[in-house]
Image (spheres, grey):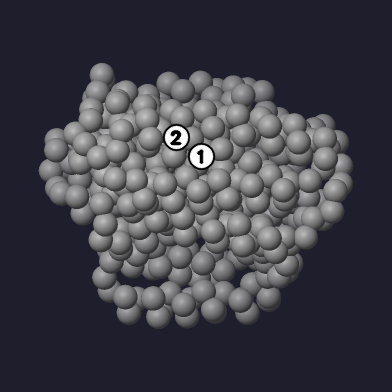
């Protein structure tokens, strides 16, 4: 439970700020152009740090890095709540994101070693349902009743409790690759290239920076081929099935995050709903995700296959997003709730199903790398989807619809290229539980 709580906090703080944004900007100053920075600063740092934590864990141990990352995350949370201006708040969100990278990469990695993949389906569902959809709901309720600063400060008691349990009960892990050198060149090239890409999309200017970003990412290929312990092994991405699943995860997240951010903003800024009411429109999405996740978990466990559920999920996301794109901007909230439920039913299969399929598609020795790559591509998909949505000069409801429609279609095409044979779910590695 403590491990799941850590991962939950990492996901939650990527989305909780959505319904609090108008109150934050009104209190500390700024305008709508700052909205994306407060979200993207967290997403960039939590995204690019995931593979770094994954590799450092091989050298220094997961428990130590997980607790260090949790401490960094909590320090950033306290600073966010105390911030008196937007520059300080953005800097604190950056620190928060650096800590969240450890929570996302390492908490689920430890859990994966200690349980079977069927249980991971449920764990991932709880984490992502609560984080992606529960974040805006919690943000709205906290903002209306306690103030937006408590959306950050409430992380402290929860995180401290989880950290205490982990420190006391999680055994020190064996460092499996002690003595091998960290791929510093690969880390620099990967983080530099991804950061430039995301900054360009966020600022919607300085497009020439995409040229050095492309050069950095291209230079990563030969560096990784020569590295003793590559940060992003080319062999992993070269597998057709793994590449298809990672691409699907990218597009699923690119569809989910714009809906979670722009739908509450539309309801508050265009329809003038209170933050809590705007967040409650997402409840049908939450319910759809919960039901679909449970149904998918049972089906995957019984059949040993995830592809049919993933294809159905992508189709439902596309249909729900098409409704957002077509509905009048003064539509009744119940119609918006129905569309949100369709998107939720589509996201449900993707939450744990993609993780299971990715881990099943690679040899056991590569499951750690596959897990980190899965988290990285999903985080990157959310960042790119949210930033790219800002390029569209449409009302917020239309942005959510068209972003989800495009990303859902691409997710379906990615899954269609995945070749899957029915197979029993792998159990946890017994050696990892000793």
Q: Is residue 180 visible?
A: no
Tell me where residue 15 appears, x and y as whole percent. Answer: 40, 39
Q: Front-most of 321 and 216?
A: 321
Q: Which residue is mark 2?
A: 338
In percent of the image, x 29 and y 26: which residue is there? 277
Q: Horizontal placement of 181 versus 273: left or right?
A: right
Label placed on residue 148: none
Q: Is residue 169 visible?
A: yes
Image: 235 above or below 318:
below
Q: Horizontal placement of 64 versus 331: left or right?
A: right
Q: Which residue is mark 1?
A: 342
In percent of the image, x 82 and y 42: which residue is there? 304
Q: Front-most of 110 and 142?
A: 142
Q: Front-most of 431 and 240?
A: 240
- Quadrant where the C terminus lies? top right
Mark 2 neighbour class, 10 Å CA radius: few under 14, some 14 to 19, many 20 or more: some
Tell me where residue 305 appears, x and y as whole percent. Answer: 79, 46
- Distance (Cα) linking label 1 and label 2: 6 Å
**In which image quadrant can residue 123 be found?**
top right
- Quadrant where the N terminus lies? top right
Q: Does dot 2 land on a helix, a strand or a loop?
A: helix
**In which image quadrant can residue 205 be found?**
bottom left
In percent of the image, x 20 and y 41: which residue is there? 270
In percent of the image, x 24 and y 23: which residue is there? 144
Count of numbered circles in the view: 2
Image: 33 above or below 270:
below
Tell me where residue 186 appears, x and y as whole percent. Answer: 56, 69
**Is label 1 in contact with label 2 (beta carbons under 8 Å)?**
yes
Q: Does dot 1 land on a helix, a strand or a loop?
A: helix
Tell me where residue 294 appears, x and y as whole percent. Answer: 66, 30
């Amino acid at each position: 439970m403590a491990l799941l709580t850590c991962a939950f906090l990492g996901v939650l703080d990527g989305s909780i700020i959505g319904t609090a944004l108008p109150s934050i900007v009104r209190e500390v100053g700024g305008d709508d152009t700052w909205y994306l920075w407060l979200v993207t600063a967290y997403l960039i740092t939590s995204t690019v740090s995931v593979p770094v934590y994954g590799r450092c864990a091989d050298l220094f141990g997961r428990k130590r890095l997980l607790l260090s990352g949790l401490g960094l995350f909590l320090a950033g949370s306290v600073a966010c709540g105390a911030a008196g201006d937007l520059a300080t708040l953005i800097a604190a969100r950056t620190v928060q994101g650096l800590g969240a990278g450890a929570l996302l990469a390492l908490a689920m990695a430890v859990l994966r070693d200690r349980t079977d993949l069927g249980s991971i389906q449920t764990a991932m569902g709880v984490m992502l349902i609560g984080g992606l959809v529960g974040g805006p709901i919690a943000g709205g309720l906290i903002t209306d009743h306690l103030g937006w600063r408590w959306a950050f400060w409430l992380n402290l008691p929860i995180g401290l409790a989880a950290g205490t349990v982990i420190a006391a009960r999680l055994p020190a892990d064996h460092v499996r690759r002690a003595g091998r050198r960290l791929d510093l060149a690969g880390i620099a090239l990967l983080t530099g290239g991804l950061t430039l890409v995301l900054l360009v999309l966020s600022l919607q200017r300085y497009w020439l920076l995409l040229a050095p970003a492309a050069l950095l990412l291209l230079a990563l290929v030969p560096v990784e081929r020569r590295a003793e312990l590559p940060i992003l092994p080319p062999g992993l991405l070269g597998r057709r099935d793994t590449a298809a699943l990672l691409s699907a995860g990218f597009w699923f997240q690119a569809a989910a995050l714009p809906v979670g951010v722009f739908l509450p903003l539309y309801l508050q800024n265009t329809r003038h709903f209170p933050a809590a009411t705007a967040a409650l429109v997402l409840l049908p999405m939450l319910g759809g995700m919960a039901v679909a996740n449970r149904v998918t978990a049972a089906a995957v466990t019984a059949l040993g296959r995830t592809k049919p559920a993933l294809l159905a999920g992508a189709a439902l996301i596309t249909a729900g997003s098409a409704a957002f794109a077509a509905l009048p901007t003064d539509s009744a909230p119940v119609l918006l709730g129905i569309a949100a439920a369709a998107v939720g039913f589509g996201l449900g299969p993707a939450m744990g199903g993609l993780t299971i399929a990715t881990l099943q598609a690679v040899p056991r020795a590569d499951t750690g790398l596959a897990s980190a790559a899965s988290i990285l591509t999903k985080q990157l998909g959310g960042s790119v989807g949210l930033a790219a949505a800002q390029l569209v000069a449409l009302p917020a409801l239309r942005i959510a619809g068209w972003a989800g429609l495009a990303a859902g279609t691409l997710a379906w095409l990615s899954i269609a290229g995945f070749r899957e044979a029915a197979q029993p779910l792998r159990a946890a590695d017994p050696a990892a539980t000793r």
